[in-house]
Amino acid sequence: MVTFAEILDAADKLTPDEQESLVEILKRRIAESNRAHIAREVAEARAEHQQSPAEPSSVADIMDEIRNAP
């Protein structure tokens, strides 16, 4: 396994253009990973909601719950 320090050393050996490309690729991969994570959370929330749909509440009921929370 390559260490983080070795990766940084290898990146230092790249040309400035290659370093810029590397940064852009990493940013794109991080964004894709974040989108996938959000999509999984949305799917989980939808499945949870379908299993036990939320019941309508008034503002007063919600405020009472907040005030009485431990």
Image (tube, helix red, strand yellow):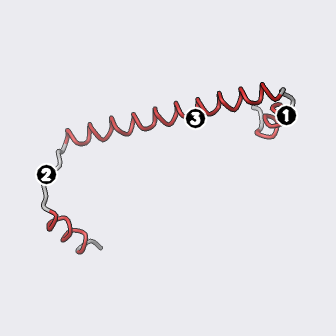
Of the pair 38 and 19, the residue shown nearer to us: 19
Residue extending furthest right? 13
Q: What kind of residue is marked 2?
A: Glu
Taking 6 as reference, is 20 left or right? Answer: left
Taking 51 as reference, is 22 left or right? Answer: right
Of the pair 52 and 28, the residue shown nearer to us: 28
Nearer the N terminus, badge 1 or badge 2?
1
Nearer the N terminus, badge 3 or badge 2?
3
Question: Which image quadrant for residue 68?
Answer: bottom left
Quadrant where the N terminus is found in the figure: top right
Q: CA distance from mark 1 to mark 2?
A: 57 Å
Q: Which residue is mark 1?
A: 12
x then y, percent, for residue 47: 26, 37
Q: How many numbered discs, if any?
A: 3
Q: Residue at x 69, y 32 (%)?
A: 23
Q: Which residue is mark 3?
A: 30
Of the pair 18 and 32, the residue shown nearer to us: 18
Q: What kind of residue is marked 3?
A: Ile
Vertical side of 28 occupied by 62: above or below: below
Q: Tag 1's secondary structure?
A: helix
Taking 8 as reference, is 31 left or right? Answer: left
Question: Which image quadrant for residue 10?
Answer: top right
Report if the CB atoms under discs 3 and 2 are less than 8 Å apart.
Answer: no
Q: What kind of residue is marked 1?
A: Asp
Q: Residue at x 84, y 26 (%)?
A: 15
Q: CA distance from mark 1 to mark 3?
A: 21 Å
x then y, percent, for residue 38: 42, 38
Mark 3 or 2: in front is 3
Taking 45 as reference, is 62 left or right? Answer: left
Mark 1 or 2: in front is 1
Quadrant where the C terminus is found in the figure: bottom left
Q: Which residue is mark 2?
A: 55
